[in-house]
Amino acid sequence: MNKNKIILGLLAILTLPSISSAATIEGMVDGAVRTTFYIAGGVVVILWLVTGMIFLSAAGSPEKLGEGKKALFAAIAGTVLCIVAAGAVGLVSSMFNL
């Protein structure tokens, strides 16, 4: 539970500059969404790198390969989630002509 609070707090701190520099509410939301997507994209890239390192260091060990498969699934899910979220934001903004 505390981990989630820390992550949300860091996300709020990182999005604060883009929110505070906006003149309108639309600009605030746009800045927050962009910053969130940048952070999520960075996390996905790091997750792919960690997954590759796990597979490279497995050296045929079934336990490490199982850990690598879990990490690979998480990386794929994170990538798909980012793409779907970006599509949903685009869809909603086009529906409301934002």
Image (cartoon, rainbow, N blue to C red):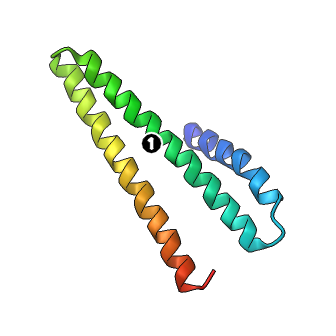
**Residue drawn at x 15%, y 16% as measured from the top left:** 60
- Residue 62 vertical position relative to residue 38 in the rendered view, above or below: above
The residue closer to the viewer here, 37 or 4, is 37
| Residue 86 in the figure: left or right of residue 58 | right
x and y percentages locating residue 63 in the rendered image: 20, 21
Q: How many marks?
A: 1
| Residue 90 in the figure: left or right of residue 51 | right
x and y percentages locating residue 80 in the rendered image: 36, 55
Q: Residues within 10 Å of mark 1 (few under 14, many from 20)?
A: many
Residue position for label 1 = 44
* Quarter holding residue 87: bottom left
Task: Tell me the element at label 1.
Answer: helix
* Quarter holding residue 98: bottom right
**Residue drawn at x 60%, y 53% as measured from the top left:** 36
- Residue 88 vertical position relative to residue 2 in the rendered view, above or below: below
- Residue 27 vertical position relative to residue 62 in the rendered view, above or below: below
| Residue 37 in the figure: left or right of residue 74 | right
x and y percentages locating residue 46 in the rendered image: 46, 34
* Quarter holding residue 73: top left
Residue furthest bottom as drawn: 96
x and y percentages locating residue 75 in the rendered image: 35, 42
| Residue 79 in the figure: left or right of residue 94 | left
Identify the amino acid type marked 1: Val
Q: Quadrant of the N terminus?
A: top right
**Residue drawn at x 41%, y 35% as measured from the top left:** 47
**Residue drawn at x 44%, y 55% as measured from the top left:** 82
